[in-house]
Image (tube, rainbow, N blue to C red):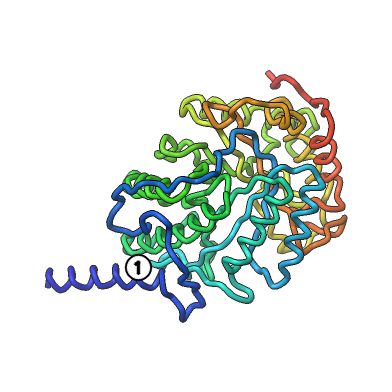
Amino acid sequence: MTKALATITVTVFLLALFGALNADRNGTDSGSHPKNGTLNATSSTSTELQTSSHTPITGQLIGAALNLYHTDHLSLYHNALEQMSDTGFNAVQIVTPMFQVDGASAAVQLRRGKGLGPSKADIVSLLTHAKELGMSTMLMPQINFTKPRGNEWRGKLQPQHWDPWWASYRAAIGEFLEIAEANDVDVFVVGCELLTTHKPEHEARWRDLIAVSRQSFSGRLTYSTTWDTYPKVGFWDDLDAVGVSGYWDITTLAEDPGQPTDDELASRWLEIKQRLLAFAQSQDKPVLLTEVGYPSLPWALTKPWNYINKDKLPPDPEAQARGYAAFISAWHDSIQPNKQETDSMNYWSGPHPAGVFFHKWDPYHRGGPEDYGYGVAGKPAYRHLIDWLNGPVEPASQQLNP
C-alpha cells in the first residue's frame, strides 16, 4: 500500500508539471522557458546569468496599474499608456493573469485567448510601447480563480498537495520571467497576495524560486503582499524591495470616523508611512507601494479594497478624491515626481520609498461622475494627481495627532 501511494504521488506531481507546461486543452500557450535554467520543481542548481545590457532602476517609480486581462481591444491599452504618460507617470505596472480553478487546485495554468489572458505578443507590445514613451515597467503575474468557492481568492490557496502546485507555479512564473528579461522590464513581481504561502513551511520554496529567478532575470525582484500581512513575510531579505498593497482604513484617527476631516485622513496616512518606513529600516530594504487606490464608492476611505457595489449605490467620486489627497499630502516629501530628472540617489539601496503604483488605470471605462470603479479619468481625484505630478503640493498636515 505504501509503495502504491508513493507511486500515485509521484505520478500526480509529474502530471501537474507537464500540464502546466503543455495544457493545450485549456488554451495554454506552452511557449518557451527561461533562458537560464527552467524553473522546475526539483532543482535550483545555479547557472550563470546571461549578460544583459539592462541597468537596474535606481529612481522612484510613480505609476499606475494596467490590468492586462481581456485584450480583445488591445488598442485601448496602448491609448491608456499614452494617457498615463501625458498625466505625468514615469512607470506602468502590467498586471497579467495566471489561472486556477479554485483554492484547492493543484495546478496553475496560463490560459490565453479571447476573454482569457493576453498572448505573449500582447504583453510584449505594451512593454515596448511603454519604453518608447520613456516609462519604466513592472510586470506582475497574478493568480485568478475561474470557479472560486464562496468568497475564495488567491490569498486562500490550500491545495491538498503542495508539490504539484509549486511545480506548476514555478513553470508559469518562468514564462513571464523570460518575457521580462527579453523586454528590459525594470521590476518583476514573483508573487502577489499568496497569503497561505507565508507560512514557515513554504519559506524555502520562496527562497529557491527567488534564487532561480535571478538566474534568468537581471532587473529588480519583489513580492506584493497585503497591508496587514507584510510583517509576516519571511523572505524579504532575498528580494530587492518590500512590496505592499495599501488598502488601509484611513479613518481610524478621526474623532468621527463617519465624517473624517482632511487633516485626520492625512494624519492616518502619515502614521502608516512611519510604520512602513520603520519596517523597511528593520529589513534594510526599500518599500514599494504596489497598489494604492480608492473606488468611487461611499466606503472608499474605510474599505478601499472593496469594489463590489452589490446594492447599486450611487458613485461617490469625492470619497475617492479625498483618499488620493490624503495620500499625496502624507507622501509628497518622500515620493517626489518633480525631482526625478535631477535626482542621483539610489532609492533601491537601503530603507527608502521606492515609489507607488496607483490602482488602477481603466482602459475600458471612460470614467466620469457615473463610474464607481478605481479609475480616475474625469473625476476629482485626477486633478489631485495632475497637480502632484506636475507641480508642488502643500501638505494638509505635517504632524500626527497626539
- The picture places residue 229, in percent across and down from the top left corner, at 50, 41
- The picture places residue 246, in percent across and down from the top left corner, at 62, 42
- The picture places residue 62, in percent across and down from the top left corner, at 69, 40
Left or right of 90 on screen, residue 176:
left
- Towards the viewer: 7 or 125: 125
Q: Is residue 29 above or below residue 347?
A: below
- The picture places residue 393, in percent across and down from the top left corner, at 82, 29
Instruction: Tell me if residue 149 can be seen.
Output: no
- Towards the viewer: 364 or 260: 364
Q: Is residue 258 above or below residue 306?
A: above
Kindly indicate the quadrant of the structure image that contains residue 267.
top right
Q: Residues within 10 Å of mark 1 (few under 14, many from 20)?
A: many
Q: Secondary structure at mark 1?
A: helix
Kindly indicate the quadrant of the structure image that contains residue 234.
top left
Q: Residue at x 18, y 68 (%)?
A: 6
Kindly indicate the quadrant of the structure image that contains residue 338.
top right
Instruction: Tell me if residue 336 can be seen.
Output: yes
Q: Residue at x 65, y 62 (%)?
A: 125
- Towards the viewer: 342 or 118: 342
Q: Is residue 347 above or below residue 320?
A: above
Q: Amino acid at mark 1?
A: Leu
Left or right of 123 on screen, residue 219:
left
Looking at the rendering, in which quadrant would you find the C terminus?
top right
Looking at the rendering, in which quadrant would you find the N terminus?
bottom left
Q: Residue at x 55, y 44 (%)?
A: 54
Q: Which residue is mark 1?
A: 17
